[in-house]
Image (cartoon, rainbow, N blue to C red):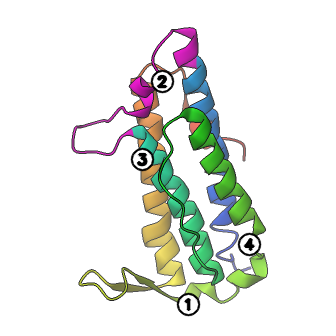
């Protein structure tokens, strides 16, 4: 039996985006209960040269929607990165989940050999097969930003664990 790129992408993105939503909800509750300013979490960084939590969530959502769209041969929606609150990040996750859920699984047929061009027309242009794009680029990038968000919140004292990171499967 062959594993489709739809099965290897959209359900994985969906599971981890729901989990990301859950850890953000726990972080917001933690901040409220302890009277911590939300920006203490939203603007936190693991190191000064890294993006803050809010940007980590934006990028994770961007990878979920862009990888899914490219594999389905659909246009990648462009969203402004203007979120500054937990509620706005939750809305972005919901919008991402809605977008990827609406992609027709049949549109992913043949995606493993579809050419994906990253940064077209620039010196950093790179051409990958759909399979390499998903497995060697898209999923690792997505997991990096979800994991970094989790690490920031755990480091900040939010009571979350591996089950929170994994979500329902």
| Upstream in sequence: badge 3 or badge 1 | 3
On the rendered structure, is 148 left or right of 34? left
State the residue position of label 4: 103
Q: Quadrant of residue 166?
A: top right
Residue 66 position in % (x across, y down): 55, 69
Q: Are the residues tagged 4 and 1 within 8 Å (C-beta)?
A: no
In the image, 18: left or right of 66?
A: right
Q: Earlier in the sequence, mark 3 or mark 2?
A: 2
Please check the rendered image and state whether residue 145 is part of the magenta-colored stretch, yes or no: no
- Picture layout, residue 5 above or below residue 92: below
State the CA–CA distance, disc 3 to disc 1: 29 Å
Depicted 167 relative to depicted 132: above or below: above
Residue at 70% in and 86% down: 109
Q: Is residue 165 placed above or below 73 in the rendered structure?
A: above
Residue matched to label 1 = 114
Q: Nearer the viewer, residue 103 or 54?
A: 54
Instruction: Note whether 39 is above or below 12 in the view shown.
Output: above
Q: Is residue 39 magenta?
A: yes
- The residue under the point 47% across, 76% down is 133
Q: Position of residue 41 (x, y in %)?
A: 43, 28
Return the x and y of residue 12 as percentages of the image width and height. 64, 58
Task: State which mark lies toward you, 3 or 1.
Answer: 3
Of residues 32 and 11, the one nearer the viewer is 32
Secondary structure at badge 2 equals loop
Q: Which mark is residue 38?
A: 2
Q: Quadrant of the N terminus?
A: bottom right
Mark 4, Cα crowd under 10 Å, few <14 / some 14-19 / many 20+, is: some
Residue numbers of the magenta segment:
30-52
Labelled pair 3, 2 in contact (Cβ < 8 Å) = no
């Amino acid at each position: 039996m062959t594993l489709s790129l739809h099965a290897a992408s959209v359900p994985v993105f969906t599971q981890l985006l729901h989990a990301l939503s859950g850890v953000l909800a726990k972080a917001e509750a933690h901040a409220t209960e302890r009277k911590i300013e939300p920006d203490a979490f939203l603007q936190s960084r693991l190191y000064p040269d890294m993006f803050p939590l809010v940007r980590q969530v934006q990028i994770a959502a961007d990878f979920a929607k862009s990888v899914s769209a490219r594999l389905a041969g659909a246009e990648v929606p462009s969203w402004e990165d203007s979120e500054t609150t937990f509620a706005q990040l939750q809305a972005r996750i919901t919008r991402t989940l809605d977008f990827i859920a609406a992609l027709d699984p049949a549109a992913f047929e043949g995606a493993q050999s579809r050419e994906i061009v990253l940064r077209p027309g620039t010196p950093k242009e790179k051409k990958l097969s759909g399979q390499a794009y998903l497995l060697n680029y898209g999923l690792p990038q997505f997991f990096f930003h979800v994991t970094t968000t989790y690490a920031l919140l755990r480091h900040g004292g939010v009571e979350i664990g591996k089950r929170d990171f994994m979500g329902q499967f």
